[in-house]
Image: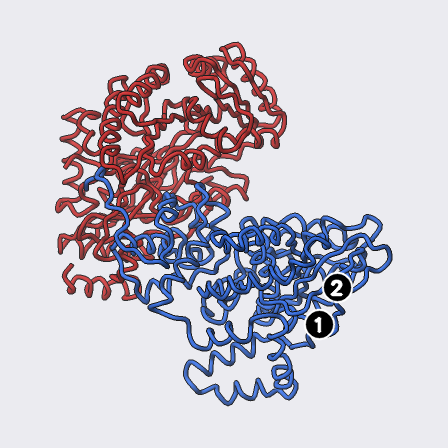
Chain colours: A red, B blue
């Protein structure tokens, strides 16, 4: 990058917020995947004005800008592109307001999601979105990917809680979108365009989120299903009985076996599926609902149902779910975590297809996910040093994305397209819709500097 | 970007580089970021565990040279091991960072002053006593303060010296000289243990170790104190002098070996020492002559809080005037050894003591002491200390208890900085005063 541009950046936002040190370029080259590309410069803005100044310079000079929060994403969206500015939003990490009167919070994008949850819980309030990376991911990153998590069946995804956004566009224009009200139909709802836009339209610098009262209690049941299809049907049966579960977490037999080999929790490994169901709400209500849930699980074909009677027993049942990540990490040198989503009724077919794809390509695939909302995490085990394995993994990944679309599902439920799924987006989206999306991109970012090469086909 | 292209793998090799395979164990999930104290202070990736491992990986991938910046980032790690406790794939992050320090040492060696101290002075509790008399004498006539005043205008050295003087506690008389080879139990003899003397404890905090001896013997322990103990090796390990730290380990193993079968435990009242002594088995795992001997030695090592909690006689009552207290977990006790409940349970035995929780204790957020870190990276250490003191103030506790000399000194510094009306004590001192 031209030294003149570095000088401009330093003059605009302060020399100590701009770095071209080789160590910084190496440490800002990645996200939660295996991809790496070093940026040319890393900037650490601390105000909306800093962000606007950077985007003004970048637009004039036609320099790509790649925003990042904690860089925990699983689709490569925050990995820099060659010759780019890495925009580290992690230092804009203040919670600006928590209003009990309006039950909302205002946060800067670098606030850690868990910190926001803890802060509002002190006031008896609840911010439900909880991606698996909740301890380390940022609220800004959650908005940029419209992050979900296991509680979505009941509580929805990040976008369902966003009331207002401040956004900086290429060129440095600042938009104030939405505000502090739940209802708002003044003008077009532009803020929805930025939710899940993966940094390709602009940079979010302030976020207003809706809060709800904190449910007082939570209880869990764990069931072993000899037939995976029965586990999916069981979730439908629970909903029909009038209970909306907090989570419905599925583990296939390969996942269960990996966890059991790692933790020795006494999980049954001869069944097709384990299903973890939790309910939350008023203390008396959850006691009643978990009994209903356990009963339905049994009547839906579960063999072994463990029903927690206390918060401590619930914790113990969660141990299996929490051990998935470390258990799988032990199985292979590298893993590729997908997040296809299909209509719930098609999950059994999808899992069967995954097993076929795994066998046909000789790539082990373990499957777990949030079946209440149809979101599955097939995880491909591979080794990046082995070219032949990686070729087969690429083929398997392509096939499973195609299979999800064929079953009426989508390529990604919560990770985003990033670069990993970019070459498959034409399979997942209608050509007319894609053309309008390109138009939206051109409208907000005419010079194409915002996270180029991500989200949309090249 | 060619997503599925195979990686070329390791490009740069060297006998002192950390294992490339182990570095690949990091899946870059970022779980370590929010528990890393230095990341918390800066929100900069290069100050995070994931970032530090990535620098090492970039070196071995041939994408980054060993630079002064790499050295700085590796040494900005507190070695608190909070990251190790949360890492989903269980990567030994702290150990890899120490291994990385070894790799930069050839190009960027430690300063001669540090090397001299760690090679010639801080090599064992007895040897370290040479510091005791001069320091005590200087403090006695306020020569230290006079010197700091005199050097005040000198750039760098002046302010540093003032910090040192401000930080230094009053030096007492070493306990080692008054310890008999065998100290009998008071009352019924129930156990026989060996005592490992920490250099810091012996020279800087001998009164704490006096408490340790009293509490151990009152709890029915006969205490054997072998002569000629070496330093545990932690300071040398921390400063990438791995050859020296392994020598210390071998010397201590050989010294305690003859009495290993006749004692139930090797007890120490320094959390840094107990953590290091327990790591000997890792330090010497690839030395066929010592691996098995190290395993036997390590199996007997107990931190004093761990040991006392295990053997506390039910009839030994603890009582004191009512006080609100809080307990600060030393990183080397909680993060490294997972000893969290034992000291709390011991304090819970003290009638009159109300224990109030300190936030961020699992994993522990370091107080900024971290060996000699606070003297080298003073601004970062003070930032962490101020945070810790604010947490302490919020508990309303009058008594702050910990179990490691570094933490106790750092907290005392924090007390002077913040002007809080608190008392700072080691767990064994609280027990001693309550018997």
Determine the residue positioned at 35% across, 19% down. Answer: A351
In terms of depth relative to the viewer, which is nearer, A77 or A119? A77
A208 with respect to A304 (left or right): left
Mark 1 or mark 2: whose residue is earlier in sequence: 1
A312 with respect to B283 (left or right): right
Image quarter of the C terminus of chain B: bottom right
* In the depicted structure, whether residue B215 falls above or below residue B415: above
Q: Which mark, by number, is residue A77?
A: none
Q: Which mark, by number, is residue B213?
A: 2
Q: Quadrant of residue A188?
A: top left
* In the depicted structure, whether residue A219 falls above or below residue A177: above
Q: Quadrant of residue B95?
A: bottom left
For disc 1, the chain is B
Mark 1 → mark 2, Cα distance in angstroms: 10 Å
Determine the residue positioned at 43% across, 77% down. Answer: B112
From the top left corner, tell me how far across and down residue A110 is, in percent.
37, 49
From the top left corner, tell me how far across and down residue B261 is, in percent.
70, 53
Q: Which residue is mark 1?
A: B175
Find numbered disc 1 in the image and state the secondary structure of the residue it sits on: loop
Badge 1 vs badge 2, beta-carbon distance below 8 Å: yes
Q: Specify whether residue B347 is in view.
A: no
Disc 2 residue crowd, few under 14, some 14–19, many 20+, Cα 10 Å: many
From the top left corner, tell me how far across and down residue B289 is, in percent.
52, 55
Disc 1 residue crowd, few under 14, some 14–19, many 20+, Cα 10 Å: many
Image quarter of the N terminus of chain B: top left
């Amino acid at each position: 990058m031209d030294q003149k541009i570095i000088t401009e950046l330093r003059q605009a936002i302060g020399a100590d917020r701009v770095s071209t040190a080789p160590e910084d370029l190496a440490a800002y080259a990645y996200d939660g995947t295996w991809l790496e590309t070093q940026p040319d410069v890393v900037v650490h803005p601390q105000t909306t004005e800093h962000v606007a100044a950077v985007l003004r310079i970048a637009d004039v000079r036609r320099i790509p800008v790649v925003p990042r929060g904690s860089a925990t994403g699983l689709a490569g969206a925050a990995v820099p592109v060659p010759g780019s500015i890495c925009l580290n939003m992690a230092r804009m990490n203040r919670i600006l307001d928590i209003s009990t009167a309006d039950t909302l919070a205002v946060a800067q994008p670098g606030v850690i999601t868990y910190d926001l949850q803890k802060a509002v819980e002190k006031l008896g309030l609840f911010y439900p979105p909880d991606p698996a990376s909740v301890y380390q991911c940022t609220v800004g990153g959650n908005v940029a990917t419209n992050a979900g998590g296991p509680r979505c069946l009941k509580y929805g995804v990040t976008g369902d809680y966003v009331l207002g956004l401040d956004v900086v566009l290429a060129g440095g224009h600042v938009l104030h979108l939405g505000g502090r009200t739940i209802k708002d139909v003044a003008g077009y709802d532009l803020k929805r365009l930025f939710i899940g836009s993966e940094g390709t339209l602009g940079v979010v610098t302030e976020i207003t989120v809706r809060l709800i009262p904190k449910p007082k209690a939570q209880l869990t049941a764990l069931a072993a299903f000899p037939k995976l299809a029965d586990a999916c049907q069981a979730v439908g049966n629970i909903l029909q009985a009038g209970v909306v579960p907090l989570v419905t977490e599925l583990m296939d037999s390969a996942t269960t076996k990996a966890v059991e080999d790692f933790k020795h929790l006494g999980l049954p490994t001869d069944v097709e599926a384990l299903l973890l169901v939790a309910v939350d709400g008023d203390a008396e209500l959850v006691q009643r609902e978990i009994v209903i849930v356990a009963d339905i699980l049994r009547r839906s074909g579960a063999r072994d149902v463990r029903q927690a009677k206390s918060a401590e027993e619930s914790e113990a049942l969660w141990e299996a779910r929490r051990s998935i990540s470390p258990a799988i990490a032990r199985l292979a040198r590298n893993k590729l975590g997908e997040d296809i989503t299909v209509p719930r009724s098609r999950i059994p077919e999808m899992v069967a297809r995954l097993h076929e794809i795994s066998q046909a390509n000789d790539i082990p695939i373990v499957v777990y996910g949030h079946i209440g909302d149809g979101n599955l995490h097939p995880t491909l085990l591979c080794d990046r040093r082995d070219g032949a394995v990686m070729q087969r993994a690429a083929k398997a990944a392509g096939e499973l994305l195609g299979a999800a679309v064929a079953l009426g599902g989508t390529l990604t439920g919560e990770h985003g397209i990033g670069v990993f799924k970019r070459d498959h987006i034409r399979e997942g989206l209608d050509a007319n819709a894609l053309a309008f999306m390109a138009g939206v991109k051109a409208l907000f970012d005419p010079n194409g500097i915002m996270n180029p090469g991500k989200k949309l086909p090249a | 970007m060619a997503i599925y292209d195979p990686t070329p793998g390791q490009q740069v090799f060297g006998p002192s580089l950390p294992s490339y395979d182990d570095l690949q164990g990091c899946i870059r999930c970022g779980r370590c970021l929010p528990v890393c104290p230095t990341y918390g202070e800066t929100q900069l990736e290069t100050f995070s565990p994931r970032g530090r491992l990535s620098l090492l990986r970039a070196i071995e991938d041939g994408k980054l040279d060993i630079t002064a910046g790499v050295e700085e980032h590796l040494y900005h790690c507190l070695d608190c091991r909070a990251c190790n406790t949360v890492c989903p794939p269980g990567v030994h992050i702290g150990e890899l960072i120490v291994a990385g320090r070894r790799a930069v040492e050839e190009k960027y060696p430690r300063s001669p002053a540090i090397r001299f101290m760690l090679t010639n002075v801080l090599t064992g509790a007895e040897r370290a006593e040479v510091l005791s008399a001069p320091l005590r004498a200087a403090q006695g006539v306020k020569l230290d303060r006079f010197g700091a005043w005199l050097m005040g205008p000198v750039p760098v050295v002046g302010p540093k010296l003032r910090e040192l003087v401000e930080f230094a506690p009053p030096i007492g008389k070493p306990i080692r000289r008054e310890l008999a080879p065998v100290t009998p139990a008071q009352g019924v003899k129930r156990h026989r243990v060996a005592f490992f003397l920490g250099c810091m404890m012996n020279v800087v905090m001998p009164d704490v170790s006096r408490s340790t001896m009293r509490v151990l013997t009152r709890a029915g322990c006969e205490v054997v104190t072998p002569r000629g103990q070496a330093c545990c090796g932690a300071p040398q390990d921390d400063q990438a002098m791995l050859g020296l730290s392994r020598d210390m380990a071998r010397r201590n193993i050989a010294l305690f070996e003859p009495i290993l079968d006749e004692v139930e435990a090797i007890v120490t009242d320094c959390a840094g020492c107990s953590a290091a002594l327990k790591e000997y088995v890792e330090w010497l795992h690839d030395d066929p002559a010592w691996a098995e001997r190290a395993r036997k030695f390590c199996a007997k090592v107990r931190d004093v809080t761990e040991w006392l909690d295990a053997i506390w006689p039910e009839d030994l009552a603890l009582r004191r005037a009512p006080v609100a207290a809080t307990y600060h977990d030393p990183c080397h006790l909680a993060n490294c050894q997972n000893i969290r409940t034992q000291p709390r349970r011991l304090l819970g035995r003290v009638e009159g003591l109300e224990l109030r929780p300190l936030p961020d204790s699992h994993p522990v957020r370091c107080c900024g002491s971290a060996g000699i870190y606070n003297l080298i990276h003073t601004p970062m250490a003070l930032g962490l200390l101020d945070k810790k003191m604010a947490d302490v103030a919020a508990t309303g506790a009058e008594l702050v208890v910990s179990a490691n000399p570094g933490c106790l000194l750092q907290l005392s510094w924090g007390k002077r900085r913040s002007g809080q009306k608190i008392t700072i004590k080691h767990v064994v001192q609280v027990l001693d005063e309550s018997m």
